[in-house]
Amino acid sequence: MSPTNEPRVAVIVLGAGNGTRLGRNEPKAFVHLAGRPTLSRALEAVFAMDEQAQVIVTVPPSFIPIAKQLARSVPGGRDRDTTVILGGSTRQESVAAALKYLDSSVEVVLVHDAARPLTPSVVFDSVAAEVLSSGAGVVPGLPVADTIKRTDDAGFVVETVDRSVLMAVQTPQGFPRAQLVAAHESATEEFTDDSALVAAAGFPVSVIAGDDLAFKITTAWELRRAEQLFTASAASGIRVGTGTDVHAYDETKPLWLAGLYWPDEVGLRGHSDGDVVSHAICDAMLSAAKLGDLGSVFGTSDPKFQDAHGDVFLRETLHLIRDAGFEVGNVSVQLIGNHPMVSRRRVEAESLLTGLLGASVSIAGTTSDALGFTGRGEGMAAIATALVHARTVAEAAHASD
């Protein structure tokens, strides 16, 4: 990262908590929500911030490799240098550990629960901006709507609490770096959140408007609620598109296929790299979103795309899809040709493409039993099917910022 782009803001994402109250064996951050780990959903909001923040994730020891891979597969994560570290046995210990990894340029630190995966990106940017402006701690919160009763040990009502002075606070909670570090260094007891810790150290903390979507997933009921918010909005806007691409073999060209370089294989003729798999996927995604096709969007002779690899087209197509209000659900590709044998590198190719798109990609290979141009060994063809869906409630909130 160049000096002019050094981050002013860091986001610590806490994912080391257990899933006991959810009735799960895995940590809460790795419980699946609408087909992806909760941590993945939470990171997507962080990566969509306007502020290009440093990101530090705390997880249990055996989950560090998984979390690193997961962070790269989240949309926007492949180009981010996310730091994944061992969390502590308590929330406070995890934050203290993460503070040691802050870049020297960081002025503001946001602390966020991975268990609040629907929190919109606008909340992160609002908290960071308020901390930078005020020079004090800021937490998002919502007015308490229910009537609150204080009871005694036997369960009898003692008094009705004035709810007009109560706020239900959420995360991310933001603080000037120096104040948060000082509060942790001077702490002599455990606090339930960082705002309490910072306030106990004598620093001011204010509350700004939170968001209904920033609720915390602690119980199985809350997990079901989050699932419903994702699936209900997605189901109303599902579209399917099909794309095809064909290229002739060319012995003078290197072979690029499914985003991978295949040494010692005959290449494919084309203005770009001739990657039929990547091109067919782009066509399928564009078709599903009713945005045209590869040729109409990128042209067939634009000099800036000469010899361009498939990842260039995939990233740009994904950007267009999201601008149109869609997310990719999954992609399936059928590759037709005599060589190479795609099964040799299927897992590698699927992993690469899944990471690029932030959605599951599956690839299958076949021949045409010596029939047609593929059977005669003149070239290769690919047929792709892509499912896209309208942005979910949380995804739409991220995009509107």
Image: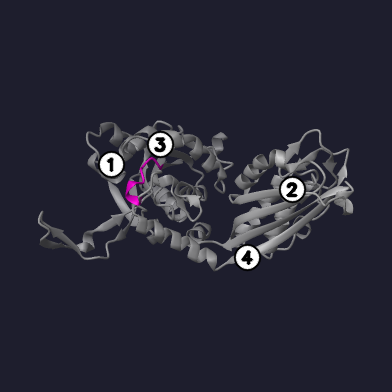
Q: Amino acid at mark 4?
A: Arg
Q: Earlier in the sequence, mark 3 or mark 1?
A: 3
Would residue 104 be counted in the magenta stretch?
no
At 48% from the left and 43% from the top, the residue drawn is 53
Q: Tag 2, which secondary structure?
A: strand
Asked if the residue at tag 2 contacts the one at tag 1, i.e. Cβ–Cβ closer than 8 Å, the answer is no
Residue 90: name its quadrant: top left
Segment colored magenta: 14-22
Spatial distance from mark 3 to mark 2, Cα to Cα? 39 Å
Mark 1 sits on what residue? 198
Total numbered badges shown on the rendered structure: 4
Which disc number belongs to residue 60? Answer: 3
Q: Amino acid at mark 2?
A: Gly
Mark 2 sits on what residue? 365
Query: Where does the image place residue 398, in percent across and percent down from the top left?
Result: 50, 56
Q: Tag 4, which secondary structure?
A: strand
